Image: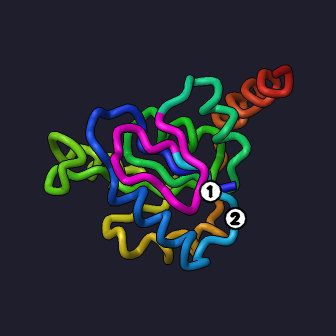
Amino acid sequence: MILVATGTHPQQFNRLIEAVDNLVENSDIDENVVMQIGYSNYIPKNAKWFRFTGYWDMLKLIKNASLVITHAGIGSVLLSVRLNKKTIVVPRVKKFGEHTNDHQLEIVKELANQRKIIPVYDISELGLAIRKAKSFKPPKSEKSSKILNITSRFLNQL
């Protein structure tokens, strides 16, 4: 399952939701897709979706995902990275009305330099990033392993 997350920021992220929906429609994605669409007003036609959920439900979705495609909100990104998930990050940008500034670009650049994520700066390259993700190996740290073990034990009790 591929999980798409837009976070809780109170602006739309239609650009990401529509791009993933189109990739599913064109059979460029061959897995089930679940999208957390937040305040976006584009409604996916080709994937399951919901607007918001609680932290523990989101954690469970991330744990079960083979790939996470997310905005560059630091909470969403770090949770996925700490769980050693293949993570594609698409920053929200001001010029598209997705955020009030472009700070998410800096977050993406830094994490990409550390090779922790696959960055997508141009939404037309999302399909390529998904193909790259198949061979991407996220770096595993001791801290990530501890968090993963604690989280896994908790989720297995649910």
Report the amino acid beneath label 2. Glu
Q: Quarter of the image containing the C terminus?
A: top right
Q: Are marks 2 and 1 in contact (CB under 8 Å)?
A: yes
Regarding residue 8, the answer to whether it shows in the image is yes
Element under label 1? strand
Element under label 2? loop
Which residue shows up at 49% across the image and 77% down it? 128
Bounds of the magenta span? Answer: 36-51
Q: Is residue 69 left or right of residue 90?
A: right
119 relative to 140, above or below: below
Q: Which residue is mark 1?
A: 33
Principal SS element in the magenta part?
A: loop
Residue 42 magenta-highlighted: yes
Quarter occupied by residue 64 = top right
Report the amino acid beneath label 1. Val
Number of labels in the image equals: 2
- Residue 114, percent across and down? 46, 54
Which residue shows up at 40% across the image and 75% down it? 125
Regarding residue 115, the answer to whether it shows in the image is no
Give me the disc on residue 31: 2
- Residue 115, percent across and down? 49, 58
Residue 139 magenta-highlighted: no
Which residue shows up at 65% across the image and 61% down it? 137
Q: Is residue 99 left or right of residue 42?
A: left
Front residue of this view, candidates 11 and 59 = 11
96 relative to 37, above or below: below
Q: Is residue 101 left or right of residue 127?
A: left
- Residue 52, percent across and down? 49, 31
Quarter occupied by residue 9 = top left
Which residue shows up at 57% across the image and 24% down it? 55
The local crowd at label 1, few if under 14, some if 14 to 19, many if 20 or more residues have their Cα within 10 Å, is many
